[in-house]
Amino acid sequence: MLGRIKEAEEEVSYYKKRHDEMFASVSALNKRIEELESHKLHLLEKLKATGDKGGLEYIVKTQKLDQVKGKELTDRVVVEDYRPELNRSKNTHNESNATP
């Protein structure tokens, strides 16, 4: 019985670790997407400024970028630093104190 409990705890630990790795990977990808979107807007503004209209109207129309105002994003969503492993260690510590 104790062996099965130990095995289950190891399995839970493994999946928590995998979750943390996947979350970090997704966070990095989301950050990269945001950088690319910002760079795209910068390039579109630069293209508009030079007067080269080689298909720009189509891009602006399809991307709904008529009113593009680069880098004036004041109402950005601020994502808190999410580290589930820290919360788990706090909860695990509290649970071990709560057991009689």
Image (tube, rainbow, N blue to C red):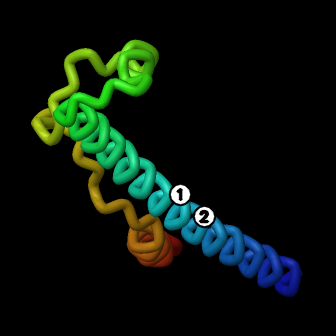
Q: Residue at x 52, y 72 (%)?
A: 99
Q: Quadrant of residue 57?
A: top left
- In this rendering, is residue 71 above or below 4? above
Q: Residue at x 87, y 79 (%)?
A: 4
Q: Quadrant of the N terminus?
A: bottom right
Residue 9 position within the rendered picture, expressed as x and y whole percent measured from the top left: 72, 77
- In this rendering, is residue 78 above or below 21? above
Residue 96 position within the rendered picture, expressed as x and y whole percent measured from the top left: 49, 77
Amino acid beneath label 2: Met
- In this rendering, is residue 84 above or below 3? above
Q: Quadrant of residue 76?
A: top left
The disc placed on residue 22 is 2
What element does badge 1 sit on?
Answer: helix
Q: Residue at x 46, y 58 (%)?
A: 27
The disc placed on residue 38 is none
Residue 2 position within the rendered picture, expressed as x and y whole percent measured from the top left: 83, 85
| Closer to the camera in the image, 83 or 22 | 22
Is the residue marked by circle 2 packed among few (<14), some (14-19), or many (20+) residues within 10 Å?
A: few
What element does badge 2 sit on?
Answer: helix
Residue 83 position within the rendered picture, expressed as x and y whole percent measured from the top left: 40, 67
**Residue 90 appears left or right of 38:** right
**Residue 99 appears left or right of 3:** left
**Residue 82 appears left or right of 51:** right
Q: CA distance from mark 2 to mark 1?
A: 6 Å
The residue wearing badge 1 is 26
Q: Residue at x 15, y 36 (%)?
A: 73
Circle 2/circle 1 CB separation < 8 Å: yes
Badge count: 2
| Closer to the camera in the image, 20 or 98 | 20
Amino acid beneath label 1: Val
